[in-house]
Image (cartoon, grey):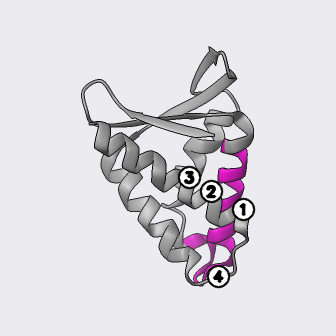
Amino acid sequence: MLDAKPTKKGAGLEIFGHPEDFESLHETLHTLCESAPGGLDQHEHALSLAYEIRKAFEGQREVAETEQGVLVGTPLLWPHALFYTSYFRNLAAYCPTTKADQANLYRLEDCIETAIAEY
């Protein structure tokens, strides 16, 4: 489960979810960068999103206890979130992906669309 809402001032969004979902998304982002043409050096900037996701599931960003259990989260600026989500979808077109990878990308895209609509 991933959920997103716009930040208070509207500069970006905050993504929250279970640590396992964040870890799975992190693995997907790394898989895409490693298997896409160009290698890790070319995709180094895109991995900044994976870095934020990793720091979130390690508990070094925002942590909230809810009825659903412990949720972790991280804030992202709109340009960063929109560009890199599109970038990872484009990478997925050039390398083999699993259904879990596709699900992670769809979850991320849905979070961003929901937060934009709410804003």
Labels in figure, total: 4
The residue under label 3 is which amino acid type? Arg
Q: Which mark is residue 100?
A: 1
Circle 3: element type: helix
Disc ID at residue 95: 4
Q: Tell me whether the residue at label 3 lies in contact with that at label 2, contact meaning CB atoms closer than 8 angstroms.
A: yes
In the structure shown, which secondary structural element does the residue marked by tag 4 occupy?
Answer: loop
Residue 42 lies in the magenta-colored region: no
Q: Which secondary structure lies at badge 1?
A: helix
Mark 2 and 1 residues: CB-CB less than 8 Å, in contact? yes
Asked whether disc 4 touches disc 3, contact meaning CB atoms under 8 Å apart, the reply is: no
Report the span colored magenta.
22-41
C-alpha span from label 4 to label 2: 15 Å
What residue is at 71 percent from the left and 35 percent from the top?
19
Position above or below: 4 against 110: above
Residue 52 vs 60, above or below: the answer is below
Residue at horizontal 31 percent and vertical 52 percent from the top: 79
Residue under pointer 2:
104
Q: Which residue is mark 3?
A: 107
